[in-house]
Amino acid sequence: MENLFLVCLIPPTSIIEDIDEIRNYISEKYNVHESLKRPAHITLYNPVRLTSAAQEKTFFDSLNDAAFAQPFNQVLMNFGSFAMHTFYLNVVQNDGIMNLQAQIKKELKPLKLLPELDNFKYTPHLTLAFKDLKPPVYELISADFKNKNFKRSFEVSGFSVYKHIEKRWQPYREYLFKNPEEKPKPLSLFY
């Protein structure tokens, strides 16, 4: 048994339609198609391969513990890139998304699913083109979008887990936020 999972935020359908319009435009005009193989999403935890039912149970229990969070408003605004290889929609950093990502990472850390080298600074983004994006095309896309503006916002009240099934990412589980004040405290001999 081996399954691949992705923990992410999925914007509302109306915003996904706008994003897909941009992704399709980029794909058709610049012949880059890799990002269309994935749903429009904001990664909260890099994809992980789980190899046993016990490992999956621990993974999903840990995510359940990470769901104690307050809803927040998330803004997507304009465009950015990781030099020469990834073009994306900016996900405006705020306490909500940064705390959520940190909480998920903290709850999953004991499972040692990602290499220690994967301890990078989190830069929330929504990928529009990558993998098959070559530097000359990256330059063209960057120039094309340099003066274009985009802004959408949405309420975040949970996060999603997608599972890789038959070479496609499919919705698998939803975690709605729970009141952080109701999170059970760890047992301790001390007060």
Image (cartoon, rainbow, N blue to C red):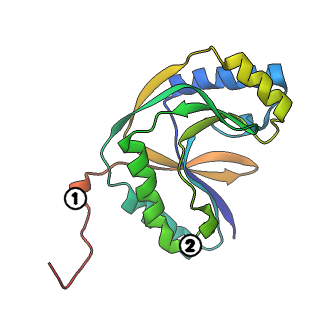
Residue at (62% x, 31% y) in the render: 80
Whole-Å distance between the Cαs marked 2 and 1? Answer: 27 Å
Query: Which of labels 2 and 1 is toward the front?
Result: 2
According to the image, label 2 marks what residue? Answer: 112
Percent x, y for residue 38? 68, 40
> Which label was assigned to residue 114?
none
Using the rendered view, name the quadrant where residue 153 is placed.
top left
Q: Are marks 2 and 1 in contact (CB under 8 Å)?
A: no
Q: Secondary structure at mark 2?
A: loop
**Relative vertical location of residue 41 with respect to residue 54 in this rendering, above or below:** above
Q: Amino acid at mark 2?
A: Lys
**Relative vertical location of residue 43 with respect to residue 111 in this rendering, above or below:** above
Residue at (48% x, 22% y) in the render: 152
Quarter placement of the C terminus? bottom left
Nearer to the camera, 132 or 116: 116
Q: Residue furthest left?
A: 191
Q: Of label 2 and label 1, which has the lower sequence position?
A: 2
Percent x, y for residue 20? 65, 25
> Which label was assigned to residue 182?
1
Q: Amino acid at mark 1?
A: Glu
